[in-house]
Amino acid sequence: MEAELAELERVQTLILQRISNLELSSFPQNSLSVSSSVRSSDANCSQIADGDDIEARLSAILRSNGVRDFSFKRVPSDYYDWSLEARRDSLGAASVDHLCKSIVLVNTQAPSDIIDCSDCKNSKYYIVVVQYTARFNAETVKNYLYMLNDCKIAKKKFNLRLAPEEISAKLTGYEHNAVTCIGLKTEIPVILDEAIVRLNPDFFWLGGGEVDLKLGIKTSEFIKFVKPFIVGCSST
């Protein structure tokens, strides 16, 4: 029975990947634009050749949008083999709770006409920022989006699941363990876990655009710039 369930899950994942690829191929050209809040600054960076310093590009985007309290740090290639305590010490983070990640989610039950991120209240994709020490709760996001749409969309039409890695990379422009909310290839609405907002000090770490590059940023400045939905969407 367990083997049959595992095989069913594998097949479902493959089907989801194929559907996502088909939907991405039909994206309107303007849906793959950068976030409106960084469009002008990112356009200035579009002339930077591939392979140029991502840190410099993202730093320019942050500064041009009024973010001042941030820091980039390089980490060793085996960083993700380390304990959270070792990662904390490497970055100089205040605690392991200040170590966060950005994950791309897909609404697998979105209506057939919802194929992109043009409606932030009812998007096909979302980026959720959560702590490594917390467990993401998709049900709370489902309930939040249901209420955000004034209960006019059936709750069953919200079913957020982890997007396949190749879809995440195509949407964000960043590979696995490098995803950040800055300088995205696609305008994707961001959800910030409320637990991060309550951290003291209010300075957290997340991906920095490259696997070995991490970004630390003041929480209040992140919120002012990114303008995420703030949702209590995790448990410890």
Image (tube, helix red, strand yellow):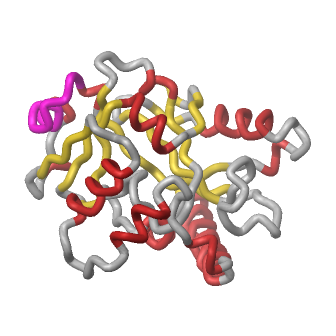
Please provide percent x and percent y for residue 172.
45, 64
Left or right: 196, with 120 as reference point: left
The residue sitting at 23% across, 48% down in the picture is: 214
Q: Toward which corner of the image does residue 227 lie, by quadrant?
A: top right
In this view, which residue lies farthest toward the right? 152
112, above or below 61, in the image: below
Left or right: 99, with 5 as reference point: left
Quadrant where the C terminus is found in the figure: top left
The residue sitting at 11% across, 54% down in the picture is: 78
Q: Nearer the viewer, residue 197 or 36?
A: 36
Q: What span is in magenta?
A: 86-95
Q: Main secondary structure of the magenta part?
A: helix
Q: Specify whether residue 93 is painted magenta.
A: yes
24, above or below 13, in the image: below
Left or right: 193, with 81 as reference point: right
Please provide percent x and percent y for residue 213.
20, 54
Please provide percent x and percent y for residue 93.
19, 29
